[in-house]
Amino acid sequence: MAGTKAGAIKARKTIIEKYGRDHWASIGQVGGQNSVSGGFASHVTGKDGLTGVQRSKVVGFKGGKISKRPASIKYVYKGKPKTLVEIGQKLGIGNQSARAYAIRNKLERLS
């Protein structure tokens, strides 16, 4: 019965009988108490002056800029042929955002 809805119902019933109804809540509580970093969802300001959400944006931006798959497709940007990497650098955005910019603004694709 493993992997079926009937098996899940039976397992739930067994867990409640053995450990009580608050079993899952107590597991979550232990995990929360053991957490010290707060993660990217944290709203606590760290030593760098950023909250977890702000830090995730900075780190994601850095990771996007150093992507090992640069976009070699050229678009006409302000009358000159530019790659998505170059467009992104001009606008201060990552490669994926530059691609979205090119599509949204209907830049002419050269190659």
Image (cartoon, rainbow, N blue to C red):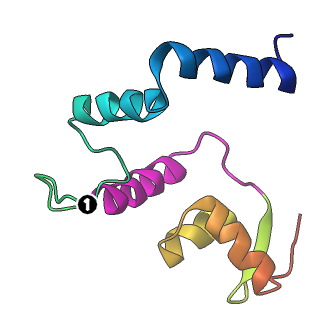
In the displayed structure, would residue 11 be above or below residue 58? above
Q: x, y (%) of residue 95? A: 62, 60
Q: What residue occupies the far left of the structure in this picture?
A: 47
- Magenta highlight range: 51-72
In the displayed structure, would residue 79 be above or below residue 97? below
Seen at 27% across and 44% down, the residue is: 38
Residue at which label 1 appears = 51
Crowd tier of the residue under label 1, counting other residues whose Cα lies within 10 Å: few below 14, some 14–19, many 20 or above: some
Determine whether, in the image, residue 79 is placed left or right of residue 85.
right
Q: x, y (%) of residue 80? A: 71, 81
- Residue 96: image quadrant is bottom right
Q: x, y (%) of residue 105? A: 76, 87
**What element does badge 1 sit on?**
loop
Q: Is residue 62 magenta?
A: yes
Determine whether, in the image, residue 7 is placed left or right of residue 78.
right
Seen at 15% across and 55% down, the residue is: 48
Magenta stretch: dominant secondary structure: helix
Q: Is residue 83 visible?
A: no
Determine whether, in the image, residue 14 is placed left or right of residue 108.
left
Nearest the eye: 26 or 56:
26
In the displayed structure, would residue 19 be above or below residue 107? above
